[in-house]
Amino acid sequence: MTQAMADAMRPPFPAERGLDVYNKKLGMWIFLASEVMFFGALIGSYVILRFGAAGDWAKPGVVLNIKITAFNTFLLICSSVSMVKAYAAIQDGYPDKLRFWLLMTILGGACFVGIQVFEYIHLVEHGFVPSGVREGSELAEMVAAGSLPAATMGLYGSTFFTMTGFHGFHVTCGVLSMLYLYVTKALPGKYTAQDFAGIEVVGLYWHFVDLVWIILFTIVYLV
Amino acid sequence: MTTVAAASHTAHAHHDDRSFIKKYIFSTDHKIIGIQFLFLSLFFLLVGGFLAMQIRWQLGFPGKPMPGGSLLPETMAPGGVILPEYYIQLVTMHGTFMVFFAIMLLLVGVYANFLIPLKIGAHDMAFPRINMASFWSAFAAGGVMLASMYVPEGAARAGWTMYAPLSAREDLSGAALGQQLWSVSIILFGLSSVLGSLNYITTVINNRAPGMTWFRMPLSIWALFITAILGLLAVPVLAGAAIMLLFEQVLGTHFFDPAAGGQVLLWQHLFWFFGHPEVYILILPAMGIASDLIANGSRKPIFGYHSMVFAICGIAFLGWIVWGHHMFVSGMNPTLGSSFMVSTLLIAVPSAIKVFNWMGTMWRGNLRFHVPMLHGVGFVAMFTIGGLSGIFMAATPVDMFIHDTYFIVAHIHYVLFGGSLFAIFGAIVYWFPKMFGRMMNEGWGKVHFWLTMLFYNMTFFPMHNLGMAGHMRRLYDPNIYDFLKPLQPLNTFISISAFLLFGSQIIFFVNFWWSMFKGKKAPLNPWEDNGLEWTLPSPAPHGNWETPPTVYRGPYEFSVPGMSEDYLPQTKKLPTDREPAMTPAHGH
Amino acid sequence: METAHKRPNYILIWVYLAVLTALELGLAFELPISKNVKLALLLFLAIWKALLVGLYFMHLKFERWNLRILAIVPIPLALILIAAGMSEHIW
Amino acid sequence: MAWWLPAQASTFAGSIDKGFLAILIITGITFVLVEVGLIVFVIRYRARPGRKAHYTHGSTPAEVIWTAIPAVTMVILGIASNGLWVKIKGRSSVPAGAYTIGVHAKQFEWWFTYPGPDGKLGRVKQSLIDKTSNPTGLDPDDPASKDDIVVRNQLHVPTGHPVVLYLSAEDVIHSFYVPQFRVRQDAVPGLEIRVWFEATVPGNYELGCSMLCGMGHYKMRAQVFAHTQADFDTWAADRAAKAKGEGTS
């Protein structure tokens, strides 16, 4: 970022030299550090539980639909690119391009959440629930037939829904805050090449959520 | 709530055009938020104290009807006699309220909020609205926790550490809604804590006044800054664990359920991974505040400022790799036990550095025993006992004997009451003028200090002996055991001392409220201190400074040779001082 | 004053991410390699992707070190927790 | 002596007490040093008119001294304690030929399983647990379980012979604690934890749960009988004969 831009987003109060990053951006990075610990606790519990589990884990793709989730992953990656394009656009001073790319990002995120909700409904219908496998469901029959390991299905359900659920919650928060910025700031054209703090900050959050999904997709769906 | 209503009387001197609600209830001013936190946390301190008195009644006079106990419902204490299930709720809620809602809010909520902008010379926090959200989510968390005591089956009853599976299964604990509300409250509390922490960290990094370099910051600010980092990174782990616990209770997940492959020790690892940094969250700010009080009272620069800073950082760093010492006898891998023992013992080093530096500060000083100084010295004396008794628990073989006995109860109270709470009392008296524009009564403050010191030691010191005799924690009636029967007189003695200790807090309580309305009007700088906050009127106005202060030196320049006064404010420019190389101001 | 920083080619990063995701998907099928090798490869690809997002989209590559430290600090802490938790099962 | 450490009744009770006393001496010296120092400073350096405090920012040699001394002390203490820790709780610490007893903890009672004449504990299965007929879940299909003796709330141990306990918990975490033996170990659901000790003094002791396990935690108590080896053998034979006579375990 250029010095002049950085200065515009600095508080007007003279201060001892800090991190040379404006407050909102620094605050977002600090918040993300705490988010790393939050997801670290959830993912760490999953790793510890799976590592110590008595039996095998269900094979990838048997319970979860990898294809639709792979598409969802792709969607989230695309929305990350559109977010960064929005950021580049306003940095260069094109508010109309910003509006376009931001809208794309919002749509991408909304689709991701929609598909995840669809996936959840589908899974629950098949009998995959946070407590494991629902009695008398399609999956319960598979467990009985031995094509799914009975010993670890409870942990599978617990960890899957907790991790992806909280990720989905974060995506939803991201979509809502981008929508808020889109309506209150981007549409009225309040962002300029000198002041686009909101876009950069929400972008950082959005990329972080994408980053978490990249890890989750690999360790939950593919391993 | 009384807390907010009372805030309204505090500052009528500065009339600005904000409405009453904006000014005192949904305020974004860090000082008002700090005062809100003060009322909230003092309220919970009182609640926690009441619970402790009930615990002590049962232990001192087991099975006897408690005075006023007939007011409690049949499900808690029929005829005033405490029931076992109510007793473990008392134990659980006393720990929860005191750790999360009293001490942590008093230090991190009140003093981080109130002091950071004032002491580094900022207008306000970096994110005032997030700051307000932090208070209101703490308020909600406290409300939920308080409400959980009034649901039909009563409050959570698995101890403040909430060990699963007892906490996770209602058929084993006997409480469903109470346990769930505990989890919900802790999740809200985690949110509040993260919002607060990110605010404190950003403010300290970016919003220091010109000349306020890192090594000119008061130790209280250093401690609060490091504490905020600990809170930022540790509390999300607790929130994650509490979420898993809530899902276990509500959705029937299996994280901690061995029958379905879950792991019981996972909860303990998560809880103590948060819990040990939490212990330092509860003591580091008290150490920082005590440093400020002792330097001021000794009229001497703090001894070894840099090593004090490094000791704070060292404690914070070691705090991440010692959590296993809470789990030596939990069935944890014994090799981990060995490594956790070594890292735990090493914490004695920075703690010793701090104690000796406080003594070094007093050495050849000119000690003024105002009430805050008394509390500062009391802090050092009592924290030393708490720190030393920790070494017994750190040594694994000895811990095997005294783990989960009253020895650990004595230890934690020496650190949290003798340490943190003494520093907090000192801090309240010390910054009372900046908060409310009046001084607290000096004489009654001294009476309160000495009575507290006396009864506090009478209450908690004998607990070491209880623990050495093998008295387990959280026993409803120790007389079940033959070998504990001879300890009953000691337990009764402790209980009577505890009642007297609680009684002497009334003095503080009355002094606090009386001084708020009738106390002596406070001058600008009643303690003749160097800090930036003392250049402001008492109480400090909204927005703090019209023009930012410029800082020329560290905060502990007392008794500088050649000066007529024995203090030298940070903002006073001497002919030899150079202007700081500050970053220029930028307009919009 | 100019755009002193080099702006990365975001579309190229996007192509990278898409290709790496496709590679991961390929690894999810039954392959004649051991489970551990597969796990290592998948983790490697995931970390690569995560680094691409962190370094380019979140601009960590163009930030000062003190901001990078902020982003890195929590990771070893989380790893310590995981390592201790896992060590319960290997003694 | 009720306010001091309880009597020593196991082989490592003496070592643990020595560790306790060593730490008590180290901390005691520090305690006296600090508290007396504080009192002296408070009196000697109290404010008097016309006096000014000595202006100093510290002293590096002093910092080095009070960093180094605690550091060295703590490292020595750690090394010394670790030997004892490994001896008591280490992976391969259980002495060969130790007498095996199964301990099953549940809300709010202790169940002890003695191996009987064959010296082997039968297999247990959580799924077989029945409150009245099979409180510890002993598997009747295992030949080793046929002669096992199951006793509620009474732990009998021989003196002069190491005993290894296999701790299990049925519902929540409990903690096995006999103060005179200086031994404590949590019993954790889902884990089988070994803990050993060797009683030295015959007598009656008390075993308590030291981990909050629910509203009956306070009364989760069992009696411990440390017998001489001869008495213990008589007791065990007696119980075995009784069990045979009843035809059930």
Image (spheres, rainbow, N blue to C red):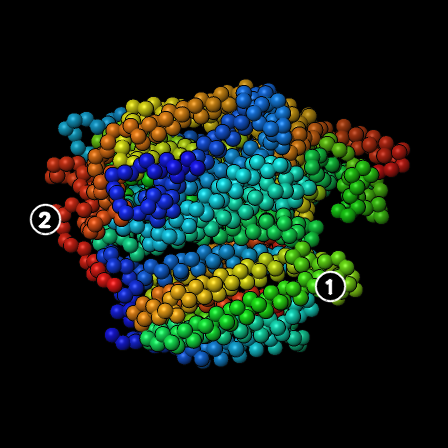
Please say if B586 is above or below B367.
Answer: below
Residue matched to label 1? A139
Could you tell me which secondary element the residue under label 1 belongs to?
helix
Quick check: can you spot residue C47? no
Q: Residue at x 48, y 44 (%)?
A: B140
Q: Quadrant of the N terminus of chain A?
A: bottom left
> Which of B267/D192 is in front?
B267
Could you tell whether B64 is left or right of B53 in the image?
right
Q: Quadrant of the C terminus of chain A?
A: bottom right
User: Which label lies toward us, 2 or 1?
Assistant: 1
Residue matched to label 2? B575
Q: Residue at x 28, y 59 (%)?
A: A11
> What is the chain letter for disc 1?
A
> What is the chain letter for disc 2?
B
Tell me the CA gap for discs 2 and 1. 82 Å
Q: Are marks 2 and 1 in contact (CB under 8 Å)?
A: no
Q: Residues within 10 Å of mark 2 (few under 14, many from 20)?
A: few
Percent of width and height locating residue B462: 49, 25
Disc 2 marks a residue whose amino acid type is Pro
Q: Residue at x 39, y 74 (%)?
A: A98
